[in-house]
Structures are given as C-alpha cells and as structure tokens.
Image: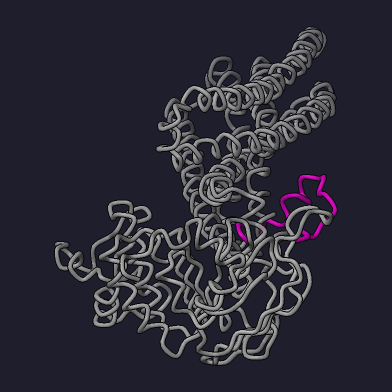
Amino acid sequence: MTTPTRPPRTSLIARMRPLWPYFGAYTGTWAIVMLGAMIGAATEPLIPAMFKLLLDLGFQKHTLELWTVPVVLLSIFGVRGLAGYVSQIGLSRITNQGLMVMRRAMFNKLLVAHMQLFSDQSSSALSNSIVYETQNGASMLVNSLLSLTRNALTLVALTGYLLYLNWKLTLIVIAVFPAVAWVMRVLTARLHSLTKASQDATDSLAYVVEENVLAHRDIRMYSAQASQAKRFDQLGDSLQRLAMKSTVAGAAMTPMTQMLAAMALSTVISVALVQSAAADTSVGGFVAFVTAMLMIIAPIRQLSEVSGPITRGLAALERGLNLIEDVPRETQGAFSKPRACGEIEFRDVVVQYGAPDSAPVINRLSLSIHGGETVAFVGASGAGKSTLVNLLPRFVDLRSGQILVDGHDVGDWDLHALRAQFAFVSQHVIMLNDSIAANVALGMVLQRDKVLACLTAANLGALVTDLPQGIDTVVGHNAMQLSGGQRQRLAIARALYKDAPILILDEATSALDTESERAVQDALQGLMHNRTTLVIAHRLSTVMHATRIVTMEAGQIVETGTHEDLIQRNGHYARLYQIGLGLNNTPGT
C-alpha cells in the first residue's frame, strides 16, 4: 500500500485549515464565543480608566459620587464574568460536537481502510489516536485558541488605551512585541518536533502494555516479567526525557517574555517619572498608565504560554487527519450478485510480503474449484494455506496473478457483495463485547429463532439454556468467560447463521473435544451440503471426506487427490499423515 504524500503544512493557519470542517462548522456558536471574548477584552481598559477617575475626581477634586464606585465595579466585573461564562459554554459545545464529528470520520475510515493499515500500525496506536489523542488535542487546541483570541484582543484594547493616554511611552511597549514573537516562533518549532517524538514514544509504550496484557499467560509461564519490566522502563525513560525536553522548551517561553516585558515596563516608568516632573500630568493619568502597563503583562505572558498547547493539540489532531485524509480506502469494483454459485479459480497467483526480493508466500499457484466442492488444504506450517484462503475476501493483496469468483475477478466485485459470499471460521476466534445473539447475527438482521437454531446446531444449546439471560447474555471482552471450545462453536454458529454459499474453515474444530467435535461435524456436514467449502485442518476426521485434498509446500501445490489416492501415492500427504496429521483422529476411523 502506498500512502499518498502531500506537501508539509508549515504555517499555523495552513495546519489549522483542514480542521475547519470539524470544529468550524458552528459559525453561530463561534460568533457568540468571539463576541464574549471581545466584550471581556473591552472591559480590561475600563479598570485603569476607573482608577484615573477615582484619583482625579474622588481624591483630588472630591466631585465623584460615592455610589458610582460600587456600581461601576460591579457592572464591569458582572459584564466580564457573563461574557466569560457564555464563551466557555460555547467553547465546550464546539469542542464536543467537533470531536464527535472527527471521531466518527476516523472510525468510518477505519472500517473501510486498506488492510495494510492494520499491519503498519498496532491496535493500541489506532485506538489511542481515535479515543485519547483527539480528546486531548481538541480540548487543548480549542481552549488555547479562545485564550489566544481573548488575550490578543485584551492586548489590543490595553495598547489602544495606552496610546490614548501617552503615545510616546506606548511606543516603548510596542517595541517589545517583535522580540516576543521571535521567542515564541523559535520555541514553538522546538515544541512541535518534541511533541511528534513524544507521540511515537507513547505509542511504543502503549504497545508494550497491550502485548503484555494479551500474552499475560506466556509472560508468567516463561518467567519473562523482568525482561518485560526492563522493556517498559526503557520506553518509559525515553518518554520521560522527551517530556522533560518539552517542559524545558515550554517553561523557557514565559520567563523570557516576562523579562522582555519587565525591561519595557522599567523603561516606561522611568520615562513617565521624567515626564511627570516636566509636564502637567495628573496623578490619576500616571496611575492609570502604570496600571494598564502592569495589566498588559498578563496577556503577553499568556500569549507566550499558549503556543505549547496549540502545538500539542495540533500534533494530536493531525494524526487523526492523517488517518482520515492519507490512509487509502480499499479499492473495489461494481460487480455484484445476491448469491454466488461458488466457482473459484486461482490463476498464477503470487503473494509476497516485505521487500521485492523476499521469498513469495504463494508462488505461481493455479487451482480451480467447482461450485459445491469441498477442498481441504494440508501442509506444514508456513506452507501458505491460510494466506491462500484469505485472498478470496481480499484480506490479502496479490503481487500478481488473478482470482476469479463465479468467473469475475475479485477486484471487479463490489466488496460488500464479495464478502457476503463467504462465511469464515478461523482458529483465532474474535467476539465482540455484546450479547450472544448479536455476535451470532453479526452484521445481519437478528432473528431470535434462527439464532437459537444455529446455536443448537453448533452444540451450544445446553450452554444457552443454563445462562440466566439466554442469548441476551453479554459475553464480555472477546467472550473470555467462555472456554476456547465454546468460543469456537460460537464462531461456527455465526457461520451457520450467515448461510453463505462459500464456507472457509481454518482449523474450525481445533479447540473442540471429541464429543463436541462429533456434534459440530454433523452440523458442518449439513452446512457444507451444496456449498463450496475450503477446509484447512490438521485432523484427519476433518479432511478425509473432502472431495479433493490439496497438499501445499512453500506456497505451491505439490499434490491433489482424495485421501485414499494420496495415501497410495506415498508422497507429501502420506508423510504428513504418518508424522501426525492423523494422530488426532478418532478411534475406528
């Protein structure tokens, strides 16, 4: 799979533009948020202006009415508080609704993404991107944007008020702005690279945790706790170092900008004292100017701090955008039919993983299978049996060759129509955290009577009867409260329910005891009637009644025939039979 490349986005606006369809669609809410931010910013200069009036009219001229002080103060802070409250509510709505839209787009892309995605990325990395990173990224980005807007407007309002009071002194303040912008630009670029590295380190750490949860029995069986703890510590230390580097870069921004602001403030106060001695400057005007100067430090400091959350939020959301925009969908054709006849043909099929010079997993294999035929595939591990059957529903891509279902190339089929022709029972059973009925009727309309009939045919009738909620019982994470044999029979019940014309059984009875296998084999025999069935198995009882047995080695077919024919030839199949293929066979077969 080749992921399309796009030119890197460098500017903040260019990086934020792709997020607009998700977080920018609520223009009315954004307008309310911006209005609240503007009102809040407009109230900032009123505080030093009030001090000016209070000193000039109240303390010097004694003409200020006493009741106006609490009224003005309560009015200023009441309006400012209400504006902040409305902005925060609107911001929460934008964040949560935009997050829902983006997560939905990511999950929908996950459902139709090219299969190579699941080879390139671990399940922990994908789930982390969809669930956690988008949550944190959206919250940081949207809140930081509001802070950026509010503080920028506050800075403009206070700067305008300072210009009104004394434009000469204000020029000293404005001279600090380019230096602050340069500091923010340099440190923001550093934070961006560190955030990307931290995301990769977090994925690696999450994958180690995922591996140890899935393989907890093997870890304990082989006493590998120490080595796994060392693995975890190494990755944790790497993540900690990256976190400290990010903290250093982010923390340096605030004192540097504060020092620049302090230099400007000290210069302004010194010049203002000189001016006050030479000119007719009122006490209220001087206090108002100094107060506004002190107030302007807060938005400058917050503007210097906002670049870190914006950078981290953007980096987190960009991973989601990469999944939505850059990961290709599965390709498909337009051909479809309600029910296939089950004719299958492999023509010079080659499957190769990894580098072009690596050994092919399937090497120029050709095979024709007639509708209703039962074909069993046997061979040593790594012979290519599972890869071959996974080519049919296009879970694996061809390097070259052609595969036909009912005379049509699988690439020409509509994917939904193609996969509707197959029922698949694997040795690796995956169940959803849902009811038994929902797991059996996966992707189809749930018919309770049909579910019960399929469960009974798969020898699970007694189990369902004993459960308090019957087929409505939630099986939990991968149905782990059921035994391995019960989970596999549940997968067989799912295949029975689908009633597809082509059945693929990949070690479908490997986890069953002898009694359960007999019952399931009877159900499978009925299911296989008038259906094309492909069987991969190591039990002789599973393969010996096949119409044909195909023996594979190193991705090629070395023998085909019935069980009796292949035993008489004394070739590969006979050797497999002698060294263990028939060891699990029931007595008397």
Q: Vertically, is 221 above or below 529?
A: above
Q: Vertically, is 423 above or below 315?
A: below
Q: Is residue 357 magenta?
A: no
As rendered, which of 501 and 197 lies closer to the eye? 501
Q: Quadrant of the N terminus?
A: bottom right
When asked about the image quadrant of residue 78, the answer is top left
Residue at the (54%, 27%) spot, across then down:
232
When asked about the image quadrant of residue 107, the answer is bottom right
Residue at the (47%, 57%) spot, across then down:
580
As rendered, which of 532 and 434 lies closer to the eye? 532
Q: Which residues are magenta?
A: 1-23
Q: Vertically, is 541 above or below 204?
A: below
Q: Decide if residue 438 is on the left or right side of residue 423.
A: left
Image label count: 0
Q: Percent from the top left, x then y, of residue 266? A: 75, 10
As rendered, which of 339 and 168 lies closer to the eye? 339
Residue at the (74%, 31%) spot, across then down:
159
Q: Percent from the top left, x then y, of residue 220? A: 41, 31
When asked about the image quadrant of residue 237, the answer is top right
Q: Is residue 22 magenta?
A: yes
Q: Percent from the top left, x then y, of residue 450? A: 28, 82
Q: Decide if residue 517 is on the left or right side of residue 400.
A: left
Residue 12 visible in this rendered orientation of the protein: yes
Q: Percent from the top left, x then y, of residue 115? A: 64, 62
Residue 167 visible in this rendered orientation of the protein: no
Q: How is the image coloured?
A: one colour
Q: Quadrant of the C terminus?
A: bottom left
As rendered, which of 73 and 334 lies closer to the eye? 334
Q: Decide if residue 391 is on the left or right side of residue 375.
A: right
Residue at the (78%, 13%) spot, across then down:
263
